[in-house]
Amino acid sequence: MSEIQKMSCLIIGSGPAGYTAAIYAARADMKPVMYQGMQPGGQLTTTNEVENFPGYPDGVTGPEMMMQLEAQAKRFETDVRFGFITKVDFSGDVHKAWADDGTEIHADTIIISTGATAKYLGLESEQHYLKIGGGVSACAVCDGFFYRGQETVIVGAGDSACEEAHYLSKLCTKVTMLVRKDEFRASKIMAERVKNTSNIEILFNTDTVEVLGDGQGVSGTRVRNNVTGKEHDIPCTGFFVAIGHKPNTDIFQEYINLDETGYIRYEQPGTSKTNVPGVFVAGDAADKTYRQAVTAAGTGCMAALDAERYLSAKGH
């Protein structure tokens, strides 16, 4: 049995939200300890170019930005640990958590910044181009800019897919939308918006067979009509997946109020407070609307300030 480690602030998860929380918490002398999680640096580590984060006039790669944030958090003496939290217990006055190496942690405050994971189709070709940054993305707002004046394909049938298709239509010469069933899941107003956009072509009853390319970059998508069985190829340089995200919140569900899709509910809108006093949330674990690095960083700041106020009120 390993010893119990007591701390004033535990941050679960890295990424822009976690690192920003760490920077603020460390500067407030809360001596934060961060467990980086399964994907150190979060979703941004799978993003090749970040051109919309303020302060980088020439852009920056996702991994590079995360390394800089980590270095900044460490400069203020954040204890950044490789590893992840496997279990929590928020039932008593002490917030307990257990790390993958068996360490038991008792923390006065906890900031959850575990993020969300984009869902992909799981095709080998899709994963290949995703990994090398060769034309597969799950965020049109982040990456659409790179496909100006080009043709793109987007998979999805919900509101966010319609929103992303509409966003791409302003940048791209043509957007082909692949919808698996014979109708949208999206709200009527969003569906009408894409139907009325002249450069969006919607293919219903359509599945993706393969993402085509030369091994370095995407050049098309092979699709199959799931009613007729017919296949054909669509030329494109960008393949966008908008079939949803899964928030990484499973270990909290016994104690923290989640919405129907697993996102953490804010106890008080305009704060980072959860239903458990002393437990705060930042970033995409609670945000299904914006999902941007800059908004995640903002909520990381809020969570650290809320945690600091909570400790002050308790006389720490």
Image (spheres, rainbow, N blue to C red):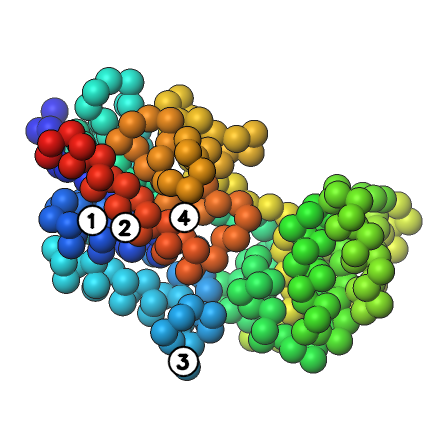
Using a 10 Å C-alpha cutoff, classify the residue at mark 3 as few (fewer than 14 neighbours), some (14 to 19) or many (20 or more). Answer: few
Query: Horizontal and vertical percent for residue 85?
Result: 29, 36
Q: Quadrant of residue 152?
A: bottom right
Q: Who comes first in sequence, dot 1 or dot 3? A: 1
Q: Which mark is residue 21?
A: 2
Marks 1 and 2: in contact by CB < 8 Å?
A: yes
Relative vertical location of residue 47 with respect to residue 186 in this rendering, above or below: below
Q: Amino acid at mark 3?
A: Pro
Query: Horizontal and vertical percent for residue 153?
Result: 71, 64
Q: Which mark is residue 25?
A: 1
Marks 2 and 3: in contact by CB < 8 Å?
A: no
Q: Amino acid at mark 2?
A: Ala
Q: Amino acid at mark 4?
A: Gly
Query: Horizontal and vertical percent for residue 48?
Result: 46, 69
Which residue has dot 4 on it? 283
Q: Amino acid at mark 1?
A: Ala
Helix, strand or loop for disc 3: loop
